[in-house]
Image: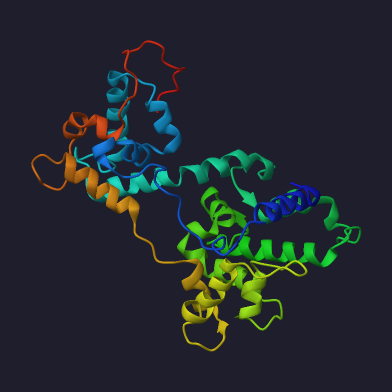
Amino acid sequence: MSVRSLASLCLLAAVAFAVPAQEKRVHHHADLSDHAHDDTHGFQYDHEAFLGKEEAKTFDQLTPEESKDRLAKIVDRIDTDKDGFINHAELHYWIKHRQRSYISENVNRHWKDYDKNEDDKIAWEEYKNTTYGYYLGEEFDDIEDKATYKSMLTRDERRFKTADRDGDGIATREEFTAFLHPEEFDYMKDLVVQETVEDIDKNGDGKINLDEYIGDMYTPEEGESEPEWVQTERKHFTESRDANKDGYLDSSEVAHWILPGEVDHAANEAKHLIHDTDTNKDEKITKKEILANWNMFVGSQATNYGEDLTKRHDEL
């Protein structure tokens, strides 16, 4: 990706963030499902949590027999210790894996753009040359906002080095995922906070005052009265965000704001599926128990047992 295309992406991002931005910086993990978790009205939440949103759509088009056959193969993959049982840890790991599948799919789509020597790794030099390319030799001299692009390069390098856990200057697929999606990795969270402070802290004192906090979300038009949501954000800053009441947000207060503690929905879903499937109440489930409750795990909306089905996907 060239600097020109990078600038275009920045412009698109600016348009996307033109709506009230008071919650845009808060990092939440992806939802397990777009559906309400209410088993009295069906198991679509469980299907999307267990399979991932895209794969759940595939299973919706299968006959019950096909769904059960594919589910049996999935169970074998979940049973990592091959003891014939699925325990909470194994099911939790599987659901978390499916929850993050959209991220890995995104990384896979762009991998070839950066892995120029096709060694299944991405060196910092590969990323830098692909992203900034021609302009590196010119020291950004022919770019109007030279300082901005130099800052972007410095920031990218710092993030790359932080994601590169073994410090060899080369990112594995996992490390490159952490580089692109740092909010998903615990060891990157300090960097996420640091980048947020740098984005909002206009006077460079390393902390965020009320004007900077509001200015990141809202710039008034001439003669415009302040919207109610902005007034609400002012109260949030003084009453809750600024925990020590010193008039600023420091790094720990920013972390509390943008990285809120969250319920582990994947752990809760694993517990729910085991509870409703574990007939002998030994807190683990067998393939037989899972297949007996196949409609909870994968389900099927096909009613004609093979008629009018859409094109089959490859076997998992």
| Rendered location of residue 110, percent (x, y) | 63, 42
Image quarter of the C terminus = top left
Q: Is residue 6 above or below residue 201?
A: above
Whether residue 198 is visible here, answered yes or no, is: no
Q: Can residue 1 be seen?
A: yes
Q: Residue furthest bottom?
A: 246
Q: Is residue 65 left or right of residue 122?
A: left
Residue at position x 51%, y 67% in the image? 258
Q: How many numbered marks does the figure carry? A: 0
Relative to 27, 152 lies left or right: right
Task: State the residue in front, 194 or 73.
Answer: 194
Depth check: give the residue in front, 197 or 36: 36
308 in relation to 60, above or below: above
The image shows residue 291 at horizontal and vertical percentages of 21, 29
The residue located at (17%, 31%) in the rendering is: 288
Q: Is residue 186 left or right of residue 59?
A: right
| Quarter of the rendering containing residue 77 | top left
- The residue depicted at 52 percent of the width and 64 percent of the height is 188
- Compared to residue 112, the image places residue 201 above or below, namely below
Q: Residue 135, position in %: x, y?
A: 85, 55
Quarter of the image where one finds residue 304: top left
